[in-house]
Amino acid sequence: MEVHENVDIQEKAVTHLIAIGSSTGGPKALQQVLSDLPKHFETPILIVQHMPAGFTKMLAQRLNMVTDCFVKEAEQGEQIKKRTVYIAPAGFHMKLEKQQTGYTISLTQLPPVNGHRPSVNVMLKSLANLDLAIVAVILTGMGNDGTEGIKMLKSKQPSAVIIAEAQETAVVYGMPKSAAATNLVDYMLPLHQIGEKVKKIASLGGN
C-alpha cells in the first residue's frame, strides 16, 4: 500500500476521537486494527504504545503503510485533524487540550505513571472533560495501564464507548483483563473484530 501524507483541507471541526492503548504485542495488534479500518476513515486516532525511545517514529512509519489514514509521531502543540493517527513519542506523556482553534496535543516529560511514560491513563484522563465523543480501546499488554483512565472517562462521559481485546487473541492479557475488571467495558472482542466495531461506532457518529 502506498505511503500516505497528511493533506490540510477545509473540513468540519473534529467531534469524535478514537484513543488506543497497548503494550506488549501492541505493534502487531495496532497493525491489525488500523488495516481493518475502511478507506477514508475520518475520525482522528490517538495511540499510546509502550516502547523504548527511538522506536515510536519507526512504528508510525510502518503503520502508515497499512492504512489510508496518515500515521505520524505526535508533535507538541499540533492541532489534531481528521484522517490522522497520532502516536505518543516514547518518553513523553500525551494529552489532548481544547484551544480556540480546535484540539491540540500536549507532550510532557512529567514523571512516569505506574512506570510508564507515555501512559495510557494520562491520555485517557485528558479526554474526560473534553466535548468529544470518545471510543477508548485497550489492546494487549502487561499490567493495568489504562484502567484508571477508563474509570475517569466513564465517570465524566457515560456515553464513551470502551472496547478491550479478548483473552483469546491478546499476547498478554494484562491491560485488557484489568480494564474488564472495572465492569465499564462495553465490548470484549477478539483482535480481528475490533477495527470493524470501531468503524461501526464511528459511522453512527457521522464520521
Image: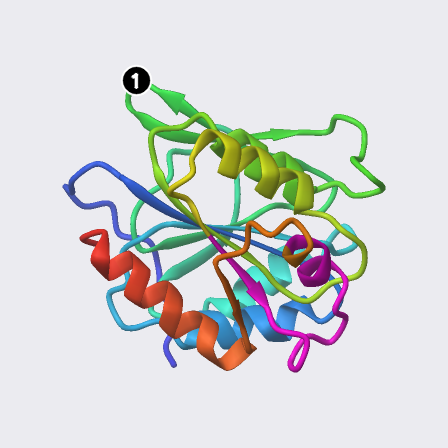
Is 64 in front, or is 23?
23
Mark yes or no: residue 65 visible. no
Quadrant location, the N terminus: bottom left
Residue 158 left/right relative to 117: left
Which residue is located at x 78 percent, y 35 percent? 113
Residue 187 left/right relative to 5: right
Q: What stretch is highlighted in magenta?
A: 162-179
Quick one: label 1, few (<14), some, or many (20+) residues within 10 Å?
Answer: few
Q: Which quadrant would residue 38 be assigned to in this image? A: bottom left
Whether residue 42 is situated above or below residue 173 in the rendered picture: above
Query: Which color scheme is applied?
Result: rainbow
Whether residue 175 is situated above or below residue 127 in the rendered picture: below
Which residue is located at x 80 percent, y 35 percent? 112
Q: On the image, numbered disc 1 is attached to which residue?
A: 100
Residue 12 left/right relative to 175: left
Residue 57 percent location from the top left of the image: 61, 56
Q: Which quadrant would residue 151 be assigned to in this image? A: top right
Quadrant location, the C terminus: bottom left
> What amino acid is labelled 1 in the image?
Gln
Residue 25 percent location from the top left of the image: 71, 71
Q: How many labels does the image show?
A: 1
Which residue is located at x 24 percent, y 65 percent? 40
Which residue is located at x 60 percent, y 73 percent? 29
Report helix, strand or loop for mark 1.
loop
Is 127 in front, or is 74?
127
Residue 78 percent location from the top left of the image: 43, 33
Whether residue 203 is situated above or below residue 191 in the rendered picture: above
Is 6 in front, or is 190?
190
Residue 180 percent location from the top left of the image: 64, 58
Answer whether residue 59 is magenta in the image.
no
Of all residues, the one furthest to the right in this rendering is 115
